[in-house]
Structure formats: C-alpha cells, structure tokens
Image (tube, grey):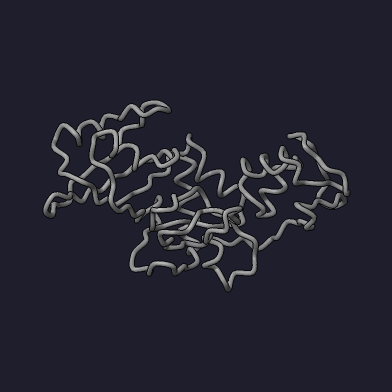
Amino acid sequence: MRLQKFLSHAGVASRRASEKLILEGNVAVNEKKVTKLGTKINPKIDIVTVNGKKIWINSKKIYIALNKPKGYISSLSDPQGRNTVIDLLRNVRERIYPVGRLDYDTEGLLILTNDGEFTYCLTHPKHSIKKVYLAEVEGIPNNTDLHQLKKGILLNDGITSPAEVFLLGTRNSRAFVQLTIHEGRNRQVRRMMEAINHPIINLKRIKIGCVELGDLQVGQYRFLTSSEVKNLQDLAKK
C-alpha cells in the first residue's frame, strides 16, 4: 500500500494533505524519515509514525456533520493558535479531519471523517458534489449580475463552473442570495460575489449533496446516518 493512501485510510488526513505531510518530512517508516511520494509499505509489518506518533488503520469509520461557527479554522491544528473545528468535537475519540474546508469567517455545514476514500470521493473535482450556500451581500444584484454567476465568473484562477443562483429577498441596501456550486476553490463564493461588486457580509453553507444543515445549532454536531453516507457515495459515482 502506498504510504499516502495508508495515512488517508488511517484517518490522519486527506490523501493530498498526507502527501504534504510526507514531503515536509513529518512521516517515518520503521523509524526512518520518508519524503518520497509513492513509497510502499506493508501495514501488517511496517511501523508508521507521524511527528513521532504511531499510526494504524482504525476499522471504525466515523462520519460527522458539524455546524461550524465563525472564528474557527477547518484544520486539525493551527500554528497561530486559533480555534479549530476539532476543538468542538470533545467527545469524539477517533482521529478525524474535515472533508474540504470552510474559511475562517464562514459558518455552516462541514463534514468530518476518518475515511480517506470517502473524503476523496467528496472532494475530487470530477465528482461534482453540489454545495449550497446562503449569502448576505452588500447591494442588490440585478438580473445581469445573477446571469453572470449562472454562466460562470472569471476569477484569477480561471472561469468558474455555472452556478445555480436565486435572489431570496432584500433588506435596506442588502440582499440575500442562495448559491449552489460544485467546485471547491479557495474562498470561491466570496470571490464570485466580489467579482460582481456585491461583497459578502455573512456566508453560511447549508447543504452538501444530500446532507442538510437543518436545525443543527452553531457549534453542535451529529453523526451522519448510514443512508446519508451511502447517498453521498452514490452521488460521487455519477
């Protein structure tokens, strides 16, 4: 088994993040530091450590839906000492990590797991898992603005895929917009709205695939049902 795949299956991090751990020299096999991607190991024989901590594959898979508050980062740790989403999961003993990210100032639905293949299915661009956001923005977008979002916006990292967009209502000089996208670019929704000159005031993610935030309170979490997990996996196969 390739080392990065082993780390992903063990719930250390996603496959891409595991590759970064290896390249940065944080992983050792049988007490020897490994920095080469593609290194193969035998999980039954070899001893793998990350920053000195022994790692093994946990057969119990965990899938959690969290209502992430603002002011938390979607990471396992932070060198700046900021709060992380892991700090909110006080009664979860398994080592889990976020599936994708929500930026520091965004709240809402975030899925966490220790299932590397599940993470890969949900985050790989080819699988096109839809994500729904509610945004409060400055100004009132007109039909031309909404049409731009629907056909794709040119950002500094390329044109976005077409979004599903609905103007839900207005209040004073602000508007409430629902956007559905399937890409996972950094701060994508915020950059899209800035591109049409309607910067975001508040942003919340309310749905990923078939999983809805519902009435889950900010800072609280629940375990996904087996049907939700299966539905997400099925969506990724389409």
The residue under the point 33% across, 27% down is: 154
Location of residue 33 with respect to 107 vertically, above or below:
above
Q: Quadrant of residue 228?
A: bottom left
The residue under the point 76% across, 57% down is: 56
Residue 146 x, y percent position in the rendering: 20, 36
Query: Which of 213 and 51 lies nearest the eye of the viewer?
Result: 51
Horizontal arrangement in the rendering, residue 124 relative to residue 173 (left or right) = right
Residue at the far left: name it.
172
The residue under the point 81% across, 40% down is: 34
Horizontal arrangement in the rendering, residue 90 relative to residue 177 (left or right) = right
Query: Which quadrant: the C terminus?
Result: top left
Query: Which quadrant: the N terminus?
Result: top right
Residue 179 x, y percent position in the rendering: 28, 45
Horizontal arrangement in the rendering, residue 46 relative to residue 175 (left or right) = right
The residue under the point 57% across, 58% down is: 81
Query: Which of 141 and 111 lies nearest the eye of the viewer?
Result: 141
Residue 138 x, y percent position in the rendering: 21, 46
Horizontal arrangement in the rendering, residue 233 relative to residue 134 (left or right) = right
Location of residue 93 with respect to 136 vertically, above or below:
below
Location of residue 60 with respect to 232 vertically, above or below:
below
Location of residue 31 with respect to 211 vertically, above or below:
above
Residue 68 x, y percent position in the rendering: 43, 60
Q: Quadrant of residue 96?
A: bottom right
